[in-house]
Amino acid sequence: MLGRFSLRGRVMLAYGLLALGLSSALALVTWSVVSDYLTQQRESSAIVETADNAAALHYGLFGAPQPCHPARERAECGSPTPNPNVSVMDLLNTLPSTDSAASMVFYNDQWYSLTGKPEDLPSDLIANVRAGSTQHRRISVNGQQVLAVGVPMTRPGEAFFEWHPLDNLDSTLRTLKITLVAAALVTAMIGLAVGRLASTLALRPLAELTRVADAVARGKLDARLQAENDRDLGGLARSFNQTAADLERRVAVDARFAGDVSHELRTPLMTMLNSMQLIQNHRAELPEAVREPVELLGYDLDRFRRLVIDLLEISRDDGGDQGSREIVRIADLVRAAADGTAGREVTTVEPEAEGLTLQADKRRLERVIANLVENAEDHAGGCKGVGVEAGGLGVIITVDDAGPGIAVEDRTRIFERFGRGETSGRGRGVGLGLAIVARHVQWHAGTIQVTERPGGGARFTVELPAKIS
């Protein structure tokens, strides 16, 4: 499950769950303590009020207790005499005003009640109070939660009952519950925010490593990490920098080797080409059986020539050649390079793109256009057209061909060195031409991609950061 989240997401989730767990535990403890305290306070106050009202009722019924004379019988001293002129219902009406919802008294084997009904009281509660013990219990009367309290009267079997509404207590507990839940959720959100901040700070070196590694992968082999003095990441930074330095040296050595080999091949290649040209000039004098092998040899020598030129070009690029930038008018450059390579007019320039210019290496940019057109001519049934229009990063250059197109899974592979479209059923991109195109476009801070041309074939799209001159 956690594998679906990024490292930053897992850190955020850990902080959020930790905050939620702690806040939930604190909320549960707070709820338990506060709710118990409020409930006990409510029960205590209800018992005290009921006892006070019972005492007031007893005083109204029997008057103040008389001191017991030594000559009188003890039994007579403990048996108060009721006042026959007092009405129990009148006394219930004159009891002090409290928050009780009902008052009832069992007196002289008879129930007296103002608002409550004795049958709403649990029978075991009545029995325990009449037996002489103070009782209280939470009950429901007509859908309302009340606290029923009973206290015994002075004479055995007589008891006084009240029930007290619990609406205020329940409302207070409900508000407390909502507040604690909201506080737990807010704390969890704060935990997520803290986790995001902490993960951002903790993963900043990793983001730097990713940036530098991406730069190295894109060919900037001199990119290095600056965290070698960090106590925690110093080892990783030094190891990465050493690896990048070794890779840079290896690429430089390979580039020098490719360049040296290419230079060494130029002389014998020129000799072979001149010899082949001489042979072709006397082709009519050759025997019929020799002419076809000579043509095949000439074709392969031309391919060999272009491969050597590409090797020289890419070794120069790998060797760190910075080139020279100048302001070029893109429309004119594309017309000259594309039409010259195709041997016919294939370029269409939109009016808004006529004035676009770019700080470019003219040689590299011409090579990009020439290689794309040459690729279409040699490997894709011919170039169907080259377009120049404003848009994207500044200018969009498209090269269309008449081939069967390039499969989606091959559209990245063909820009690799000596890459070919394995699933395209043809040898498109064999060699270094498209790899050089990708490198030169990247050198100009542009992008290149391959899509399907409307009507069939492939479309190479180059975007460069141009502007109106």
Image (cartoon, rainbow, N blue to C red):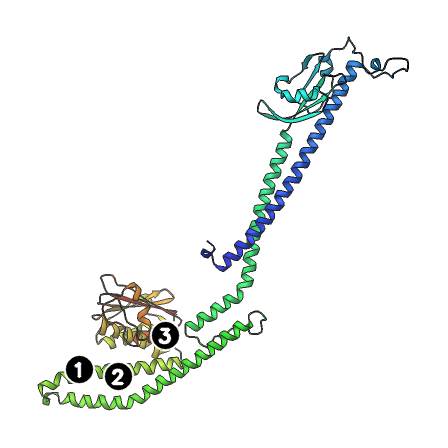
Q: Are the two marked residues, 1 and 2, in contact with CB atoms closer than 8 angstroms?
A: no
Q: Quadrant of residue 109?
A: top right
Using the image as rendered, state which of residue 250 and residue 255 is in the foreground.
Answer: 250
* Amino acid of disc 2: Arg
| Left-right relation of 341 to 294 | right
Residue at the spot of label 2: 305
Q: Quadrant of residue 448?
A: bottom left
Query: N-terminal of the two: label 2 or label 3?
Result: 2
Residue name at image x 49 percent, y 69 percent: 209
Residue at the spot of label 3: 439
Mark 3 and mark 1: Cα distance apart in space: 32 Å
Query: N-terminal of the two: label 1 or label 2?
Result: 1
Using the image as rendered, state which of residue 257 and residue 145 is in the foreground.
Answer: 145
| Left-right relation of 446 to 229 | left
Q: Position of residue 170 (x, y in %)?
A: 62, 32
Q: Are the two marked residues, 2 and 3, in contact with CB atoms closer than 8 angstroms?
A: no
* Amino acid of disc 3: Arg
Mark 2 and mark 3: Cα distance apart in space: 21 Å
Label 3 environment density (alpha carbons within 10 Å; few <14, some 14–19, many ≥20):
many
Residue at the spot of label 1: 296
Q: Is residue 242 visible?
A: yes
Of badges 1 and 2, the one in the foreground is 1
